[in-house]
Image (tube, grey):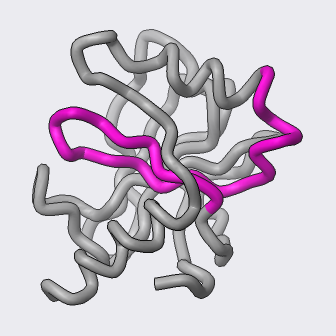
Amino acid sequence: MTGPVGGVVEWTRGTLERFVWRGGELVPYRTEPWPAPVNYGCLPGLLNPADGSEVDAVWLGEPLAVGTRLSGTPSALLHLADGDHKVVFGNLEEHHGGDLLALLAWFPPGRGARLEGPGDAAAWLATLQAGS
C-alpha cells in the first residue's frame, strides 16, 4: 500500500479527553492522566491483529479536533515489540525535534518503540489489507 490512507482523530494533541471509534462513530472513552503528545486516532476499517482494533495512527503537528478526518500517505511506522504498531503521518523532518521525540518517549522502554520508514509502514499496511 503506497497511496493515501484515511483516518480519524480520536484524541487531540495536548488534551486529556479521549474518544474511541466504535460502530462507525466516535464515543467518549476516558479522561487520561496525561495529555496526548500528538494527535492520536485510528484508520477505520483496518484491523490490527495485535489487539483486534482499528490500526492506531498519529498525526504530527498542530492540534486537530476530535472527529477530524484526514487522508494521507504514511510517513513512518512506529514499531512496537508487541505488534501494536502505529502509523505516523506528517513531515518527519519538520517534527523530528519535538513531536517524534515526545511520541517515542510516550511508550515505556519495554515496548521497544522505534521509528521505521514510510516503506515499512506501507508494507505493514499491505499485509493487513491482504489478510482482510
> Per the image, is 94 magenta?
yes
Instruction: Locate residue 52, reporting x and y percent.
Output: 11, 60
Q: Residue at x 65, y 77 (%)?
A: 71
Q: Is residue 53 left or right of residue 88?
A: left
Instruction: Reply above or below: 57 against 96.
Output: below
Q: Residue at x 47, y 55 (%)?
A: 87
Q: Residue at x 62, y 19 (%)?
A: 102
Image quadrant for the C terminus?
A: bottom left
Instruction: Locate residue 120, reporting x and y percent.
Output: 44, 61
Q: Residue at x 59, y 65 (%)?
A: 74
**Residues shaded magenta:** 75-97
Q: Which one is nearer the viewer's eye here, 51 or 113?
A: 113
Instruction: Locate residue 89, reporting x and y percent.
Output: 64, 57
Q: Is residue 8 left or right of residue 26?
A: right
Q: Which one is nearer the viewer's eye here, 102 or 7?
A: 102
> Per the image, is 78 magenta?
yes
Number of residue marks: 0
Report the residue that reaches farthest toward the right.
Answer: 94
Dividing the picture into quadrants, the one containing residue 9 is bottom right
Q: Which one is nearer the viewer's eye here, 66 or 89?
A: 89
Q: Which one is nearer the viewer's eye here, 49 or 2?
A: 2
Q: Is residue 81 left or right of residue 122?
A: left
Q: Is residue 8 left or right of residue 91?
A: left
Instruction: Reply above or below: 49 against 10.
Output: below
